[in-house]
Amino acid sequence: MFTLAAGGLVIGSSLVTGLAQADTAAANGPSVTRIFYLQGMEPRIAMRMLRSQLDVRNMAAISGHSLVVVSDTADRVDQSEMLLRQRNAVVRTSDPHKPLDLNSLGKSPFATRVFRVAGDNLNNVVTVLRSIYHVREVNESAENHSVSVTAAKPVLDSSESLLRELSLIAKPTAGSGS
């Protein structure tokens, strides 16, 4: 964790206790994840504003990229978009996957998936997985440029969609999977 903070590669919201937070969000509805591609506003400033004005629970920004990933209830994500648009800070948005039903995660089977990391994004991938999806079982392999993740299958599918949208994982080659 110190390496991430010292390197400044990715800024994530504070880690939560996992399912305790998921239960709170589930009471308000499924978790929506949206990427806000920004203009004229630094991601750190956008995150600070969303956290202070809307109490957004889960956010991540990747340094060198003008974007913020927000994951919360649909209402809170929509309010985030409205606030950022009021400041003319949004170029475009992307919803990388359908809303994640947190109520059903406890019933979903767990699996392990290996993501091949694109470039020097190992820390970025790990931080996004922990900040947005609260994945606890993440094993990094710097020598293989990969991350092994164990989580509920819907979380694996959703995180893969987000990581692909952000171009943080390598595209599979013919005959291989991630």
Image (cartoon, grey):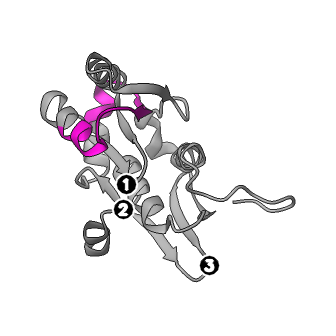
| Real-space CA distance between mark 3 and mark 1, rounded to the nearest whole angstrom | 23 Å
Q: What stretch is highlighted in magenta?
A: 24-48
Does residue 172 appear left or right of residue 45 in this picture?
A: right
Local secondary structure at mark 1: loop
Q: Where is residue 91 in the image (x, y as percent from the top left)?
A: 44, 26
Residue placed furthest toward the left: 52
Local secondary structure at mark 3: loop
Between discs 2 and 3, the one toward the N terminus: 2
Which amino acid, mark 1?
Answer: Ser
Few, some or many residues within 10 Å of mark 2 (<14, 14–19, 20+): some
Local secondary structure at mark 2: loop
Q: Is residue 144 above or below residue 111?
A: below
Asked whether 36 falls inside the magenta stretch, the response is: yes
Quadrant of the image containing the N terminus: bottom left
Q: Mark 1 points at which residue?
A: 63
Single out the mark in the foreground, 2 or 3: 2
Q: Where is residue 59 in the image (x, y as percent from the top left)?
A: 32, 43
Residue at screen point 36% across, 37% down:
70
Which amino acid, mark 2?
Answer: Leu
Q: Name the residue under label 2.
A: 9
Q: Position of residue 72 (x, y in %)?
A: 33, 33
Residue at screen point 26% across, 55% down:
15
Mark linked to residue 129: none
Q: In this view, does 143 lie above or below 172?
A: below
Q: Name the residue under label 3.
A: 144
Q: Where is residue 80 in the image (x, y as percent from the top left)?
A: 29, 25
Is mark 3 in CB contact (under 8 Å) with mark 1? no
